Amino acid sequence: MRGSGLTLTGLLLCLFAALPSLAGAFGLEDVATKAKALAQKEYRAPQPAPEFLRALDYQAYQSIRFKPEASLWRRGRSLFQIMMIPQGSFYRHQVKLNVIDREGVHPLAFEKSDFDYPNSELAKRIPADLGYAGFKLTFPLSGEGEQNQFLVFGGASYFRGVGTGQHFGLSARGVAVDTGLPSGEEFPSFTEFWLERPAGGSDTMVVYGLLNGPSLTGAYRFVIEPGESLQMKVQSKLFFRDDIDQLGLAPLTSMFYYGENTVRPRGEWRPQVHDSDGLLVHNRESGEWLWRPLLNPSQLQLSFHQVKQLDGFGLIQRDQKFHHFEDSEARYDLRPSAWVQPVGEWGPGSVVLVEIPSNAESNDNIVAFWKPDQPVKAGQELPFEYSLAFGEPGITSHPAGRAINTFLGDGDRIGGGDEAGAYRFIVDFKGGALGGLKPESPVVSKVTGGDGVEVIEHFVEYIEARDAWRLSILARPATNRPLALRGFLSLDDQPLTETWTYSQAPSTGLRANSE
């Protein structure tokens, strides 16, 4: 090389520069091109799984096990590994999987032998080209030599994640379409994924997804960073085949069966059963933090929280102590919260909360999403971007005093009051600026009622046993009208807490003997 003017180091740099980078090989625009072309064609549902697999009950399906030793990227320096999800039960169609690495982009072939089956009769009926239904990501969250599941993509457009030490609970979705409307909900599905192999030792991974449904298609890019909390950056482009009445962006889906603010169902011994206990919304324009405890209503209920500039929203599990649930198997005390923050301006719209009646903890009956004010029309394209975190309630960086308990009961009995038709609400606030106050501080309560609601009384007191400030409200709704309330605590006309809000239909089921 003497006299060439090129050192050995320089030659190596030139050679590496000539290699195609993973980022240059494939990107969001490649998926968007596919999604846009797909949106211009008539919708065709994915090829369903064989009927005998779709007919499997939950227990039988769970007996089909992926072998951990068959995980993708098990050999090599990648901290991430991939476990495949079999088709069957509610995983009802194939999802194409592709790998992006230094060799380019190539499909991931189905390997029947990568699964253990409960019996030979089922095993022999599995087609050799069946395909997968989704995948699970693992990472050494608990230490070197361990591979912990932390993110699962499977079923329609659902994906669910956890932080270190947590149990899976609520889910996110790619998009929600007409959720809660009488016309019925549409469930678009991720039909293809591209998994970008991370560099050795990297703690970040990229996944691309193609979404397809009767009314729209979509291209997604997920930048994934596991840890104490799971951090995700989501970029998306949606392409609409049809007008959509209620588009839901960055949707979250959870379960609320019963809690401290409801009557315990007959025969239940556990104090509470829920994956999330409240909706939290942060209004960037006003700075207000709004907390809405969840309900299991007697009839379908939709709540619209209008925001001109959204800073964030999420479904939160504030109950974090075992004795709140006493369930050693489900461990609802270890379920994650999820927090969505827009990137860029989403414009005016509403955080929509859908609460669906449920008689079992196996039903996901809570949905929250962002609905833009701008109507969605066929032929339109919509890009949007946001960050999404799964983890402890602190992922919200909420600085104000928080409502840690909500209790309610009749307002015409001992301890509640003597007002027929009224309800007593007890809300405990703690944290933020409340932590530095003396018990005799002149904290006051601010409470307002919705249309037709009579706020009979409200007051606040410091409760030493809880080290919390308790807001007590006695309120009466108009006959056969909903009861809506808002309240917060202040000092010297400055808010100390988030705004607690509540909304319940006329039929509440508050009395234990009511149906």
Image (cartoon, rainbow, N blue to C red):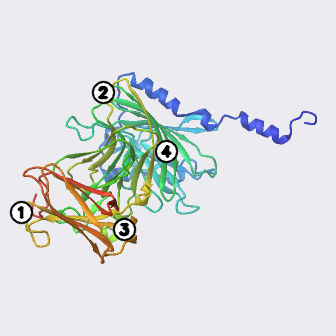
Residue at position x 90%, y 33% in the image: 4
Q: Earlier in the sequence, mark 4 or mark 3?
A: 4
Q: Which residue is mark 4?
A: 233
Q: Quadrant of residue 264?
A: bottom left
Provide residue 158's location: percent of width, then percent of height: 38, 44
Q: Relative to 2, is 135 on the left or the right?
A: left
Q: Nearer the viewer, mark 4 or mark 3?
A: 3
Compared with 380, 257 (above or below) is: below
Compared with 478, 236 (above or below) is: above
Q: Nearer the viewer, mark 1 or mark 4?
A: 1
Category of crowding for the residue at label 4, using alpha-carbon neighbours closer than 10 angstroms: few (below 14), some (14–19), many (at least 20): some
Which amino acid lies under the numbered mark 3 shown in the image of this protein?
Leu
Q: Earlier in the sequence, mark 2 or mark 3?
A: 2
Give yes or no for contact between labels 1 and 3 (Cβ–Cβ under 8 Å): no
Q: Earlier in the sequence, mark 1 or mark 2?
A: 2
Compared with 29, 125 (above or below) is: below
Category of crowding for the residue at label 3, using alpha-carbon neighbours closer than 10 angstroms: few (below 14), some (14–19), many (at least 20): many
Q: CA distance from mark 1 to mark 2?
A: 48 Å
Category of crowding for the residue at label 1, using alpha-carbon neighbours closer than 10 angstroms: few (below 14), some (14–19), many (at least 20): few
Who is closer to the viewer here, 25 or 102? 25
Looking at the rendered structure, the secondary structure element under dot 2 is loop
Give yes or no for contact between labels 4 and 3 (Cβ–Cβ under 8 Å): no
Which amino acid lies under the numbered mark 1 shown in the image of this protein?
Ala
Residue at position x 6%, y 63% in the image: 420
Q: Which residue is mark 2?
A: 243
Q: CA distance from mark 1 to mark 3?
A: 34 Å
Q: Earlier in the sequence, mark 1 or mark 3?
A: 1
Looking at the rendered structure, the secondary structure element under dot 4 is strand
Image quarter where the N terminus lies is top right
Q: Earlier in the sequence, mark 1 or mark 4?
A: 4
Q: Which residue is mark 1?
A: 420
Q: Which residue is mark 3?
A: 434
